[in-house]
Image (cartoon, rainbow, N blue to C red):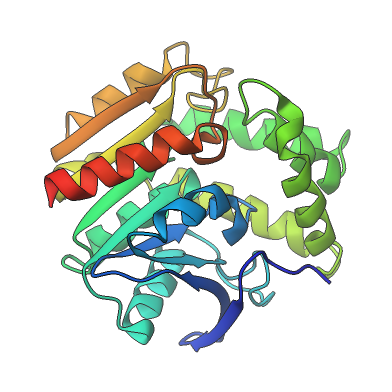
Amino acid sequence: MISYPYTTHYIDLPGNCRVAYIDEGSGERTLLFIHGLANYAPVWKKNIDELKKYYRCVAIDLPGNGLSDQHAHPFGMKFFAECVFNFINALKLKDLHIVGHSMGGQIAMTTVLNHPGCAESLILCAPAGFEQFSVMEKTMYYTSIHLLDFISSDENSLRTAIQNSFYRNHTQGDGIVKELVGIMKTYKLNYYKKMVEACIKGMMEEPVFSKLNRLHMPVLVLFGKNDALIPNKLLHHTTTEKIAADAVSKMHGAHLVMIPHCGHFVQWEKAEDVNRNIILFLENEM
């Protein structure tokens, strides 16, 4: 049985969603942390440990992930955004600032776009949703995923994805892999694979780039300069900074920080830098 480093709470939401979450610290402001694809709330541990000294820190396990339910949900950005919005209302979270990593960043943007006023600001750590894909590129990407299925198990795919998320010392994610594999083994047959595929399709088919000019709120974007996952190296011959800068230019009041010697798992690999930037952002922008 996997146990989290903090007390785990549970709440039932509309749509047959029972989600697990962490709730630490206190303060006038609340940070709501949303993890990325096939991850869980403890990926924010290094951030919560520090930021809970100043703010209330709430981290959710998205439905189908971590210790949350394993129902057959219609996984996608809109579905997750509605769950997040219902979660915000259920906990009556006020003076809220949403922090999202990778897919969680795209979910965060979708949430505030669909429900204006539900949060005061966004903090996006290596967010998905900035990179644009043509119809042909989507087809190529889906095909590559299916080809990988023939040569890799779910466990190996997970391990490879997390290792590739770090710029240096790829083994620093071993503890995360071990816990996520333990959780994966509790899933029903083929549940994990179907959930991941649906999430990837959701990121592709429910883009936010064209709507970024509707984000009239303070936004902090944090990327590792050495992100190996964004952009997709097989499809786009550009840089992480170019992808990030193009997106940030579309938003009103957005600020981009590129962190050197850092990969995709920016909030873990460079936790001190991320925490410092979050505090500066909240204290100076708000």
Q: Is 270 situated above or below 102?
A: above
- Percent across and percent down for residue 234 are 59, 18
- Percent across and percent down for residue 92 are 30, 83
Along the horizontal axis of the image, is 262 left or right of 113? Answer: right
Q: Is 47 situated above or below 63?
A: above
Picture quadrant of residue 55: bottom left
Along the horizontal axis of the image, is 142 left or right of 155? Answer: left
Say which of 206 and 242 sits in front: 242
For the image shown, how many numbered marks are present on the structure? 0
Residue farthest along the top direction in this orientation: 237
Q: Name the residue at 41% across, 29% down.
A: 223
Q: Is 31 situated above or below 245?
A: below
Q: Name the residue at 41% across, 38% down.
A: 274
Q: Name the residue at 66% across, 64% down.
A: 5
Along the horizontal axis of the image, is 219 left or right of 173? Answer: left
- Percent across and percent down for residue 122 are 27, 51
